[in-house]
Image: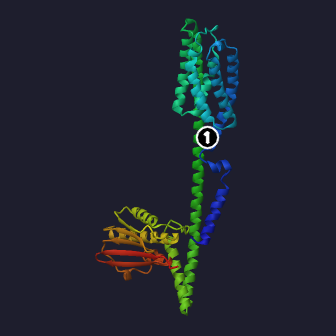
């Protein structure tokens, strides 16, 4: 890529990025911006609500007649202790899922142990015990901690479990049936509301995040497309200048050094002209290994939809290949494959990538009828520029062997001597 084109693209993308909101929250997780905030709001609301209801349940527990039971103190400390940890986690915003999950499980276990913990204690009224006040907090904890299917299970089964254990405690006395049925119905309805609100808020947050991410991606794609278009304009202008400069240098060359310089300028201009046919930019000069080169050649050949016999003869000890060299070999091999598919129908198409003793070789063979290189018009640059000049520009060599039995394009690059 030319410096002019690179500067153009950098300027366009820079201005595009400047118009995109990029606060720390956006840059760290553009796909979860709203979801994270909704989760925080839910946790805060859950913490405040649990604090109010938990305090009510705690004072009810202190004055309960069940306090005479042997397990009562242990049960109370376990339930309210785990609830306090969940409240603290919700308020500080850390460990919410773990603490909420622990409370949800402990509450169910405490509820299951309630009849045994209150054995021998006969309720004096039909009023609800203190553990009933925490049923919907268990549902809320499930919403904070568990996947949606498990939230549904908790919301439905915990109130029903309370109804069962409460009737077991009172030995299924008919006096308690209306009160317990009303308590179970109330907690089921309230739990369903909590579950629905949690699902609704999270679904809206996910949809907002997805829409936002798609908008940002679309904007970035449009900016990249605009930058690429401006780059093509810049490259076209640069090519005009490069070709004109090469022609002027060739016309004025009178010494061997001037002729060599003119030839170099012409070769560079042809290489750049050939590169404009490709969508891939020149990129960095980060080294490639030979296997990566072979993979890129195979991937490029596969895009033409022809059957290719791919063979590798790679010595693992081969030194890395400069990126510009590797890209030139890949692009030249791609052009050779395109010629084989276009003019030979892809018959007998085979590719060999070899690397050993500091030399890299890429061969593209076909079983077509061959052609006369000298008969190709000068304005056809498919071989001269896209293959020969491109490889020569990076210090390599391109050899063509063609005849009635097929064509072989051999691309060779030797590691320069130290």
Q: Is residue 10 left or right of residue 164?
A: right
Which residue corresponds to mark 1? 35
Which quadrant is the N terminus positioned in? bottom right
Query: Is residue 375 found left or right of 325 in the rendered image?
Result: left
**Quarter residue 342 falls in:** bottom left
Give x and y (percent) for residue 232: 56, 68
The picture places residue 32, in percent across and down from the top left corner, at: 60, 44
* Res. 193 in view: no
**Label 1 neighbour load within 10 Å: few <14, some 14-19, many 20+:** some
> Which residue in the rendered view is the most extreme toward the left?
405
Observer-nearest residue: 215 or 79?
A: 79
Q: How far across and down, in percent of the image, does residue 188 sit?
A: 57, 21
Q: How many marks?
A: 1
Give the residue at the far front of this rendering: 70
Q: Quadrant of residue 83?
A: top right
Tell me the residue at 54%/84% (across/down).
247
Q: Quadrant of residue 406?
A: bottom left
Residue at (66% x, 14% y) in the render: 67
Q: Secondary structure at mark 1?
A: helix
Q: Nearer the viewer, residue 290 or 267?
A: 290
The answer to whether residue 408 is left or right of residue 282 is left
Above or below for 185 versus 302: above
Q: Is residue 413 above or below residue 215?
A: below
Residue 297, x across and y down, in percent: 43, 66
Does 138 appear above or below 357? above
Most foreground residue, 359 or 252: 359
Please say whether residue 185 is visible from this viewpoint.
Answer: yes
């Amino acid at each position: 890529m030319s410096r002019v084109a690179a500067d153009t693209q950098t300027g366009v993308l820079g201005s595009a990025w400047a118009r995109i909101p990029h606060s720390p929250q956006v840059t760290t997780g553009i796909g979860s911006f709203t979801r994270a905030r909704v989760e925080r709001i839910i946790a805060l609301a859950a913490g405040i609500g649990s604090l109010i209801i938990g305090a009510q349940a705690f004072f009810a527990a202190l004055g309960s007649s069940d306090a005479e039971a042997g397990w009562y103190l242990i049960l109370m400390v376990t339930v309210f202790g785990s609830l306090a940890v969940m409240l603290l986690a919700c308020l500080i915003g850390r460990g919410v899922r773990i603490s909420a999950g622990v409370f949800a499980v402990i509450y169910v276990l405490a509820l299951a142990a309630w009849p045994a913990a209150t054995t021998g204690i006969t309720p004096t009224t039909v009023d609800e015990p203190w553990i009933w006040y925490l049923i919907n907090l268990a549902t809320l904890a499930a919403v904070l901690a568990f996947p949606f299917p498990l939230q549904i299970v908790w919301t439905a089964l915990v109130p029903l479990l309370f109804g069962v254990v409460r009737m077991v405690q009172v030995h299924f006395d008919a006096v308690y049936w209306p009160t317990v049925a009303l308590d179970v119905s109330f907690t089921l309805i309230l739990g369903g509301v909590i579950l629905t609100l949690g699902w609704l808020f999270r679904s809206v947050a996910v949809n907002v995040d997805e829409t936002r991410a798609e908008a940002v991606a679309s904007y970035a794609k449009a900016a990249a497309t605009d930058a690429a278009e401006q780059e093509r304009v810049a490259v076209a202008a640069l090519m005009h200048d490069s070709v004109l400069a090469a022609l002027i240098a060739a016309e004025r060359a009178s010494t061997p050094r001037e002729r060599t310089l003119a030839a170099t300028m012409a070769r560079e201009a042809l290489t750049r002209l050939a590169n404009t046919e490709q969508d891939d930019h020149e990129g960095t000069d980060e080294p490639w290994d030979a296997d990566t080169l072979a993979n890129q050649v195979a991937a490029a050949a596969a895009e033409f939809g022809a059957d290719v016999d791919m063979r590798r003869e790679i010595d693992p000890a081969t030194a890395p290949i400069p990126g510009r060299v590797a890209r030139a070999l890949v692009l030249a091999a791609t052009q050779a494959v395109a010629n084989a598919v276009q003019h030979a129908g892809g018959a007998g198409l085979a590719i060999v990538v070899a690397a050993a003793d500091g030399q890299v070789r890429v061969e593209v063979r076909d079983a077509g009828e061959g052609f006369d290189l000298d008969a190709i018009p000068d304005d056809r640059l498919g071989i001269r520029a896209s293959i020969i000049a491109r490889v020569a520009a990076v210090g390599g060599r391109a050899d063509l062997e063609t005849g009635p039995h097929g064509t072989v394009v051999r691309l060779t690059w030797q590691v320069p001597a130290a």
